[in-house]
Image (cartoon, rainbow, N blue to C red):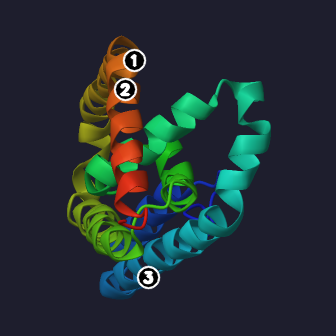
Amino acid sequence: MFESMGLPLPAESLIIASALYAGSTHQMQIQWIALAAIIGAIMGDNFGYLIGHHFGYNLLQKHGKKIGLTDERLLLGRYLFKKHGGIVVFSGRFLALLRVFVALLAGATRMPWHSFLFYNALGGICWAGGYSFITYELGKQIEKLSGPVGITLGIIGVTCIILIFLFLKKNEKRLTDEALREAKKDENSFKPQS
C-alpha cells in the first residue's frame, strides 16, 4: 500500500518472499497473501491518486521546472493521461519506478477517477494476484528459472522503457501541439454561447 502511495518500498519482493514462504513451509495460505497484496495495491494507489489530485499539480507547476517539467510537458502529461491513462495505469503496475509514481501522476494530471479506479483495480489484481499465485506455484522451480527469466524480463523491461522514452522524445512536439489543440477545444466548449 505504501509503495503505491508513492514511497519507494520493495512491495514486489515482499509479495514474492511471502508466496515462497507459504509454498515452502505451508505456514501461511496463499489466498490471504494474494488478497492482502491486491487490497494494499488498490488502496495505496487510490490514496496516491488523492494526494496527487489535491497537491500534485500545484507542486509540479511550482517546482517541476527544476527537473525538466515545463508547462508544456505538464500539459502533455495531462493530455497523455486523458487519452491513454488506462494503459499507463495498468502497465505502470508492472514497472517498479512507474508503479511508485503512476497514481500520483494520474491524480496530478486529473485523470478521471472512475477510469483510474477501473484500470488500477485491474492492474492490482493482475500484478499482486499474479505474483502471489505464480510465485507460489513455481516456488520449487524458482531457482532454476530466476537466472534466465530474470535476465530476460529485465532486458524486456529496460527495452520498453527506452522505446517509450525515445517515442516521447521524438514525438514530444507533435504530442504537445495535439495537447494544446485539445486544451483549446475543452476551453472553448466551456465558454458560454452568445
Counting residues from the start of the chain, the first of labels 2 and 3 encountered is 3
Image quadrant occupied by the N terminus: bottom right
In the rendering, which numbered label is found on residue 54? none
Q: Whole-percent x and y of residue 175?
A: 34, 27
| Residue at image location 28% in from the left, 74% down from the top | 118
Could you give the CA–CA distance between mark 1 and mark 2, rounded to whole angstroms?
A: 6 Å
Q: What residue is disc 2 on?
A: 177
Counting residues from the start of the chain, the first of labels 3 and 1 encountered is 3
| Residue at image location 52% in from the left, 41% down from the top | 97
Q: Is residue 85 above or below residue 44?
A: above
Q: Which image quarter: residue 164?
A: top left
Q: What residue is disc 1 on?
A: 173
Q: Residues within 10 Å of mark 1 (few under 14, many from 20)?
A: some
| Residue at image location 63% in from the left, 55% down from the top | 9
Amino acid at dot 2: Asp
Q: Whole-percent x and y of residue 35?
A: 37, 84
Amino acid at dot 1: Lys
Could you give the CA–CA distance between mark 3 and mark 1, rounded to whole angstroms?
A: 39 Å
